Image (cartoon, grey):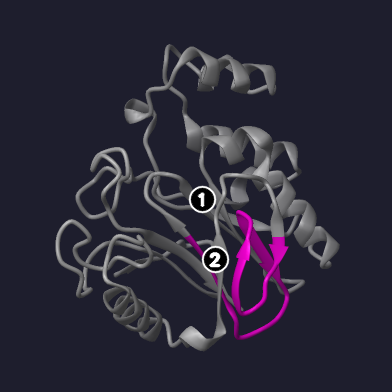
Amino acid sequence: MWLHAPNITCTHGFSDRLGGVSPKPYDTLNLGASGDDPANIEQNRKRALSHLNLSEARLCLLKQVHGTRVCRAREGSQEGDALVTRTKNIALAVGIADCFPVLFQDEQNEVIGAAHSGWKGTVDGIAANTVNEMRELGASAGNIKVAIGQGISYAEFEVGNEVIERFANAGFPETLLAGNRIDLAGCIKHTLLRCGINPMHIWHMNRSSTEEEFFSHRRDKGITGRNWGLIAL
């Protein structure tokens, strides 16, 4: 149900698709895809959150728009693609089904963040914006540890030339843009390093969202569930 990063010490996890109640094609732990019965999604969320001893009443969610807006977390839903907070006992969640969930923690200053990083958010700097907003809350880039969850792999992320050009024009190195594919996780890491994140503080799950254990929008041609990346103080 939940996979964990070794470098994040607070409550957190990256969900898989196992252990829920949803039928195909949302089987079984769909935490957000709207084509599913809302009652199934609610039951799945309760099950998933109970495994982390968290309450749905303290959940902070996003209407994700593939942008770069970072929100100060509050209970309920906001529009944007990342959340940050230093408030305890609230849970920050981002939904994914090929895009990368990225979790952030400054343990010393007690500031956390969660970002949804698809190709548009990645090229436009959602990871950098999240780090900057955490710093506004008192975090230090040198203290921030980052966990990158499952997402579309380099081998499977084939794009058009216009997308490659956007990344190249944004300064991403050619080694991450070989041929007609993009190493999206590598681009996220590149942005984090430019923000002053210690490379030893960055962990990547190194698993593809197209594996059967996860939901994948591309693999399932748009009809699929949603996994979560979640973090809470």
Residue 80: tell me if it is visible: yes
In the picture, the quarter occupied by the C terminus is bottom right
Q: Quadrant of the N terminus?
A: bottom left
Q: Answer above or below: position of 174 versus 158.
A: above
Residue furthest toward the left?
A: 24
Name the element at disc 1.
Answer: strand
- The quadrant holding residue 34 is bottom left
Whether pointer 1 and pointer 2 mark residues with C-beta atoms closer than 8 Å, the reply is: yes
61 or 179, which is in the foreground?
61
Report, in whole angstroms, how far the alpha carbon at label 1 lies from the one at label 2: 9 Å
Relative placement, left or right, of 161 versus 82 is left
Q: Is residue 73 magenta?
A: yes
Tally of numbered discs:
2
Residue at 30 percent across and 46 percent down: it is 216
111 part of magenta stretch: no
Residue 209 relative to residue 74: left or right? left
Where does residue 197 sit, x and y in percent of width and height? Answer: 70, 47
Q: Residues within 10 Å of mark 2 (few under 14, many from 20)?
A: many
Name the spot of residue 188 as percent of width and height, x first.
Answer: 58, 39
Q: Which residue is mark 1?
A: 203
Indicate the amino acid at tag 1: Trp
Q: Which residue matches tag 2?
A: 8
Q: Secondary structure at mark 2?
A: loop
Image point 65% across, 46% down: which residue?
A: 127
Which amino acid is tagged 2? Ile
Query: Image point 26% across, 76% down: which residue?
Result: 40
Residue at image point 30% right, 58% down: 225
Compared with residue 221, is residue 41 higher up or lower down, i.e. above or below?
below
Would residue 140 be visible to someone looking at this image?
no
Q: Position of residue 179 (x, y in %)?
A: 43, 11
Res. 113 mark: none
